[in-house]
Amino acid sequence: MAESISCWNCFEPLADVPLPISRHANCASCFEVLHCCRMCRHYLPNKAPYCDEDRAEPPSVKETANFCEYFEPVNRLNTSDAERSGKAKSALDNLFGGADHQPASDSEFSISELEGDETDDPLNKFNGLFDD
């Protein structure tokens, strides 16, 4: 059984899929094919032609079933992906005021604060350049 791998598309565990994965095997959750480049250990999305195996002839569509002899299923969702995702989320939280930051309500601002000073208006600054 494929207990340690997950679907490349929905990341659901593939515990009920027998190994070796058949060309006709599909994910029980999202019905995507499993014997494809996206599920393979040799798939490298950052390297053209997207395959680390020099002898393989990778298909043009990486999500379709293939007859590749070098296919080795791999779990794409690993701890390093989860760590990178966590770091990215914390960076966004820091950038936008944290996860507990709530947008300000309209009642917290007065109309004068929202309208701003007329001297700050870019059109007034532009017109001020030509006034004598």
Image (cartoon, rainbow, N blue to C red):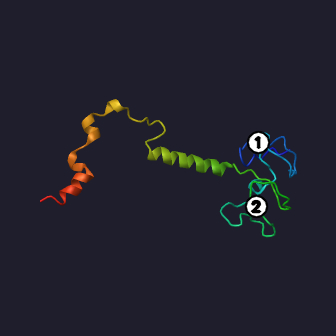
Name the quadrant containing residue 102. Answer: top left
Q: Quadrant of the N terminus?
A: top right
Residue 6 lies, in percent from the top left, at: 75, 46
Q: Residues within 10 Å of mark 2 (few under 14, many from 20)?
A: some
| Type of amino acid at the residue the image marks with label 1 | Pro
Pointer 1 and pointer 2: residues touching (CB < 8 Å)?
no
Residue pictured at 27% horizontal, 40% vertical: 115
Judge by depth and name the residue closer to the eye, 124 or 87: 124
Residue 16 lies, in percent from the top left, at: 84, 40
CA separation in Å, label 1 and label 2: 20 Å
Q: Residue 107 — which label?
A: none
Residue pictured at 46% horizontal, 41% vertical: 98
Mark positioned earlier in the residue sequence (1 or 2): 1
Q: Residue 42 — which label?
A: 2
Local SS, label 2:
loop
Q: Residues within 10 Å of mark 1 (few under 14, many from 20)?
A: some
Q: Residue 13 — which label?
A: 1
Q: How many marks?
A: 2
| Type of amino acid at the residue the image marks with label 2 | His
In the rendered image, the residue lying farthest to the left is 132
Residue 60 lies, in percent from the top left, at: 74, 62
Q: Is residue 116 above or below residue 105?
A: below
In the rendered image, the residue lying farthest to the top is 107
Judge by depth and name the residue closer to the eye, 22 or 116: 116
Local SS, label 1:
loop
